[in-house]
Amino acid sequence: MEFAELIKTPRVDNVVLHRPFYPAVEGTLCLTGHHLILSSRQDNTEELWLLHSNIDAIDKRFVGSLGTIIIKCKDFRIIQLDIPGMEECLNIASSIEALSTLDSVTLMYPFFYRPMFEVIEDGWHSFLPEQEFELYSSATSEWRLSYINKEFTVCPSYPPTVIVPKSIDDEALRKVAAFRHGGRFPVLSYYHKKNGMVIMRSGQPLTGTNGRRCKEDEKLINATLRAGKRGYLIDTRSLNVAQQARAKGGGFEQEAHYPQWRRIHKSIERYHVLQESLIKLVEACNEQTHNMDRWLGKLEASNWLTHIKEILTTACLAAQCIDREGASVLIHGTEGTDSTLQVTSLAQIILEPRSRTIRGFEALIEREWLQAGHPFQQRCAQSAYCNSKQKWEAPVFLLFLDCVWQILRQFPCSFEFNEHFLIMLFEHAYASQFGTFLGNNESERCKLKLQQKTMSLWSWVNRPSELSKFTNPLFEANNLVIWPSVAPQSLQLWEGIFLRWSRSSKYLDEAYEEMVNIIEYNKELQAKVNILRRQLAELETEDGLRESP
Amino acid sequence: MAPKGPSQEPSSNSQSPAAAAPGYVENVRLVDRVSCKKAALGTLYLTATHVIFVENAPDTRKETWILHSQISTIEKQATTATGCPLLIRCKNFQIVQLVIPQERDCHDVYISLIRLARPVKYEELYCFSFNPKLDKEEREQGWLLIDLSEEYKRMGLPDNYWQLSDVNRDYRVCDSYPTELYVPKSATAHIIVGSSKFRSRRRFPALSYYCKESHASICRSSQPLSGFSARCLEDEQMLQAIRKANPESDFIYVVDTRPKLNAMANRAAGKGYENEDNYSNIKFQFIGIENIHVMRNSLQKMLEVCELKSPSMSDFLWGLENSGWLRHIKAIMDAGIFIAKAVSEEGASVLVHCSDGWDRTAQVCSVASLLLDPYYRTVKGFMVLIEKDWIAFGHKFNHRYGNLDGDPKEISPVIDQFIECVWQLMEQFPCAFEFNERFLIHIQHHVYSCQFGNFLCNSQKERRELKIQERTYSLWSHLWKNRADYLNPLFRADHSQTQGSLHLPTAPCNFTYKFWSGMYNRFEKGMQPRQSVTDYLMAVKEESQQLEEELEALEGRLEKIQKVHFNGTKVKDKQSEPSKHSGFSTSDNNTANTPQDYSGNMKSFPSRSPSQGDEDSALILTHDNLKSSDPDLSVNSDQESGVEDLSCRSPSGGEHAPSEDSGKDRDSDEAVFLTA
């Protein structure tokens, strides 16, 4: 067994665990292939179960023969283990290091996890593209499902099934794919039923420096506009960055060749800029000793909220084009797998009431992130404590969740889910017992046979017992478009994520509980009143019957 | 809050205010500073008490009211082609920009407002003409609502250790202190008078808060006139008396809320701080809260940040940091926490002072009391707290808030900071306070409004001389009458957060202090959360109450019918209409909104390639067509109080018509859809 080789010391006694807000716990530390477990000998004390894949970095230090391992997790938690014995400590540390950085995906926990719950609905089949398409097909006949990518040959990062304009055949799509970065030809992301406008997304056009054109691409993009209609091309890069991309064979659409379209450049950061922002922010949040001004300075210097503002602003702009201007939009950056998806999915949160429900939000993540080929495995390989200067990590998905939280905060009654739901998604994107966020795209997931070999996150979440934890008690269906404020005064640090481990949430949790109680009590009363009303009505009709001859 | 107000008050469908106004100017434009929508055209009226802008738009005739006493600065800006701009900044953080067509009119308005905004006699203030149509008895009752002798009784006074002193009868010892004061039993008149002579402005140590369970107390005073070496036996005896009044503890804390450097500088002027060697068993402690001048500048800097037009995140955070505002808030909180801990955890008494003992001392004593005693976290208790620590102990409201024209260097947001401290606490302890954010905002408004007599003058003595209670109305009874609007739905008297002291983390958690946009940007409604959890929950609670009543009624009827059945007779019972429970549209009404300025760079976006003509110019997203349907959310004054329109956030939103703004918006939303 491969894991056994990595575990030199599977068990150490008298280890002391330190966590913020909890008293220190002394107990036995056990290492398994996927978990670090600490259990005290007392019956009632809580145990620590930590997935190795949740470990972002470890530090070790020694005082005499007492070793200390500081474990920094991808969910930003920091715990400390005091381990007696230098050798044990070193063994444990090297095992953790090895186990938390396994190369092979198939060695990850989801392939070993055996669920202890009853599966009511298999999450792997909860959000099939065909079902999602049906929601649109009742409203429009201008779009069709294409299976052109069923072997993942046209676009390796697209799912087998995509929605494209009806008037464009698969042959043309092939040509368009050759003209777009990563083969990501424009596909339908969202259809606005209210006015028939659409959001499409793609990779950048490969115009290069000599302004290459593609007739099929122009035809496809124009085919999405009705006669006399206009559209917006939203490039998530600044004009400067987009121009530089031409040198590498990429580029942007020349408006002359897409006469019904106007191009807008926004500037959403990518990759290491975002990663560094996260590192700085988490560092600032963990440092409790500095004074007030330094805190604000560090918050500012992290630029995290600047990124939030930029992403939200772009999403609002896209939504505004659709809903207020009556114009369709095509959104892309370079690859179309990061900032593009942030914008398309947030625009839907703003425009589409369904995506503010639990089920609808899951469908959105499935559609706009998983199937759309956001490379979760690369982006979430490391979190805020990593010191490796890898190029591919970036908190793109976390920024998206943060933006959703910002909107949720401004519209606390318009979402069916609560903050815990978003936090849960963040955790599972970085470390999970479920297979949902493994791999970088559908093609990889297919090869890994995740559907057969692992459990879907949705199978677990969509059970009444879990759903109740994630349901927002204040939710009232709101069928309107919701326009968030993007003023700096309106954007806040997401304390539920970033200060989760550095301040007690006791009083806020109590407030949440109180809120639930108020609403539950109201529902109880309503139910009681309804029963009595019915009883009375029955009695009175009985009387009526008895009286009428 | 139903609008009631002065008799000359116009409303949209009655006579125009011109009748009673000294003047009006037509074709004035009110510029919306937040969104870029077109300015509203209307008429500007100047009345004896208000500036009123009435929009021409016939369907709305929306009115914007500004009390003269709220005006902080008036700025005449350079004339442009469209007219002469006038910028009015208010003390409640409203900013109004008007454009007056004629330079001459603008100048007249400017000159009038300068005069009107800076009254020289108390009699000119609004409270002397404000008539809420209450009879004399109601007015007198109103002043009785908050009674400090009741409060001292509540604290368990007098008892074996503390007694009411009449030493300050007719303000003989200290003219900025109240007449009713509690001092240690062992402090004789001789000691008190002696001590008062050794304290700035004769503000001798007197009781602010008393914990009857532990006998620990919070006393307050001004700085001692110690200079470099002066001593005063009576003052030393006074502090000893305070210590002896707490038999459980063998020392007292003396907290000087100034930065050490400031306190040392005062010694050169013959003032200073207690020398630990001269006083037996004191523990002396500095807690550096800056002086009123630093605070005034800090607020000024923060407001400049709030005023920035579409600032970047960095502009905002950098500006906020630079203003130092939250650092000052934290310093005040830290002082309050220190004192509360000394009292609750060590059972020690504390003497608090700063220089004169009427600004920082008031802030710190009231924050500590609020942390210690859940009573002060109730609606009534909070009024009592302000009455005690601020009004009675001679906080100089007139000077600090510039009610009468005076020295601008005396103005400082001292009570604003205290109010913000309370809000910061509310954010951390959401279930601990009986009142909500709106309560704090309205109190802040009225500190400046001069609509009620409570906050007039600089001391109790001055207020008595002016016969405030006979000539004006009390804010407290006004707020009390409307308390349903001010309740926190999460408050429960038996909740753990409402028991005993609030325990704050000992670690210096800076990030627990946040920018209060609900106060400093409160007139920019677009920046606030669009759905109010407070209002939603209040509506749910109200409905639950109705359901409880209905349940009882139904049970009664059921019982009756079953009895009737049993008797075999039938009584026709009038079927009561089942009440409708159609959800709480509070949230929905507030939901409809419009996009904001997401397109800061759109006007100039550089995407058109030069080869292209402008055949699609019709499509350029101008600010105008992006904003065409943005409802004016910024200024809609409640005619009585000048408080912004809160009526649409009625707690029973479920039954209310949608607010004007959202209703209007939904239509325009529809219109966009139809033309699309």
Image (cartoon, coloured by chain):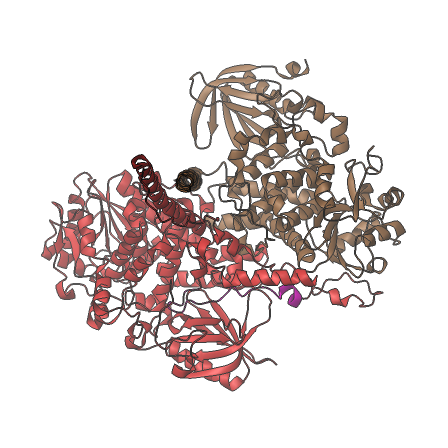
Chain colours: A brown, B red
* Residue B498 sits above or below residue B133 on the image: above
Residue A103 magenta-drawn? no
Q: Position of residue B592 (x, y in %)?
A: 56, 56
Nearest the eye: B168 or B108: B108
Residue B635 magenta-drawn? yes
Q: Is the magenta region chiefly helix, strand or loop?
A: loop
Q: Outermost residue, front direction?
A: A549
Left or right relative to B45: residue B286: left
Left or right relative to A47: residue B505: left
Q: Position of residue A422 (x, y in %)?
A: 57, 39
Nearest the eye: B672 or A400: B672
**Which quadrant holds residue A106?**
top right
Nearest the eye: B363 or A219: A219
Q: Position of residue A270 (x, y in %)?
A: 69, 45
Asked whether the viewer can see residue B281, the reply is yes
- Quadrant position of the N terminus of chain B in the picture: bottom left
* Residue A339 sits above or below residue A72 on the image: below
Give the number of callouts: 0
**Which quadrant holds residue A467?**
top right
**Which quadrant holds residue B476?**
bottom left
Q: Position of residue B76 (x, y in %)?
A: 50, 78
Which range of residues does the magenta coloring cover? Answer: B623-644
Left or right relative to B298: residue A476: right
- Quadrant position of the C terminus of chain B in the picture: bottom right
* Residue A3 sits above or below residue B334 on the image: above
Q: Outermost residue, bottom direction?
A: B104
